[in-house]
Image (spheres, rainbow, N blue to C red):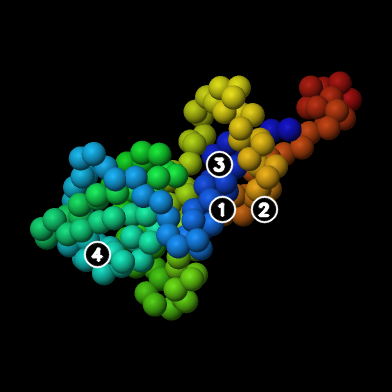
Amino acid sequence: MLVDQHAAHERLTQERLHAQFVAGGVRMQPLLLPAVVDMPPARAARLLDHAPALLRLGLEIEGFGPGAVMVRALPALLGAPEPGPLLEDLADGLAEWKGAEALEARIDAAIVRLACHGSVRAGRRLNTAEMSALLRAMEATPRAATCSHGRPTFLRMDKPMLEKMFGRR
């Protein structure tokens, strides 16, 4: 079996974030030093307009002058992603949604974006314990066969397939 570690971890993170959200709110990890992210004023305003919803998603932000957002806390499940790209991606999502979708659909889409930013990156070497933990978590997670974007998280390879790939058949 071959596992796409990013896709698998993304699904696991999404399911955990969603469970926390449904239970009352995503657990936050306060930043020791708040991060200030500069961006165009319209983008910053878009994020700040949705600050209460983002807080329920574990992202505590506030304005920091025109064109800047201060990040005070991130969802604990994400580890320590770079706040800039995460905020830019969320601002883009908020621009796309424009009130056309129900709040729950927006929340689900925001959770998918958070999960993507907080997941193990492809190419990162996992140690044996991390690999084992990932596989065990996949076994215990509904819909673990696909990532948040619908791509497969693993491929099964049987002996005839391997023999064919190595020119033995």
Report the residue marked by disc 4: 48
Residue 27 against residue 98 in the figure, above or below? above
Residue 121 percent coordinates (x, y): 48, 36
Task: Tell me whether circle 2 and circle 3 mark residues in contact (CB < 8 Å).
Answer: no
Q: Tag 3 or tag 1, which sits nearer the N-term?
A: 3
| Image quarter of the C terminus | top right
> Above or below — where is 56 with respect to 30?
below
Mark 1 vs 2: CB contact within 8 A: yes
Percent position (x, y) of residue 114? Answer: 43, 52
Is residue 158 among what the camera can see? yes
Q: Earlier in the sequence, mark 4 or mark 1?
A: 1
Disc 2 on helix, strand or loop? loop
User: Which amino acid is tagged 3?
Assistant: His
Say left or right for 151 vs 56. right
Q: CA distance from mark 1 to mark 2?
A: 9 Å
Q: Comparing marks 4 and 1, which lies closer to the viewer?
A: 1
Distance in Å between CA atoms under marks 2 and 3? 12 Å
Question: Residue flagged by tag 2: what amino acid is it?
Answer: Arg
Identify the residue shown where x is 42% and y is 59%: 25
Name the residue type under label 1.
Answer: Glu
Q: Are marks 1 and 3 in contact (CB under 8 Å)?
A: no
Mark 4 or 2, nearer chain start: 4
Most extreme residue toward the left is 65
* Marking on residue 143: 2
Q: Earlier in the sequence, mark 4 or mark 3?
A: 3
Identify the amino acid type marked 4.
Leu
Q: Nearer the viewer, mark 1 or mark 2?
A: 1
Residue 15's label in the rendered image is 1
For marks 2 and 3, the one nearer the N-term is: 3
Residue 123 higher or lower than 73, as above or below = above
Q: CA distance from mark 1 to mark 3?
A: 10 Å
Expressed as whole percent of the image width and height from the top left, the position of residue 92 reads 35, 61
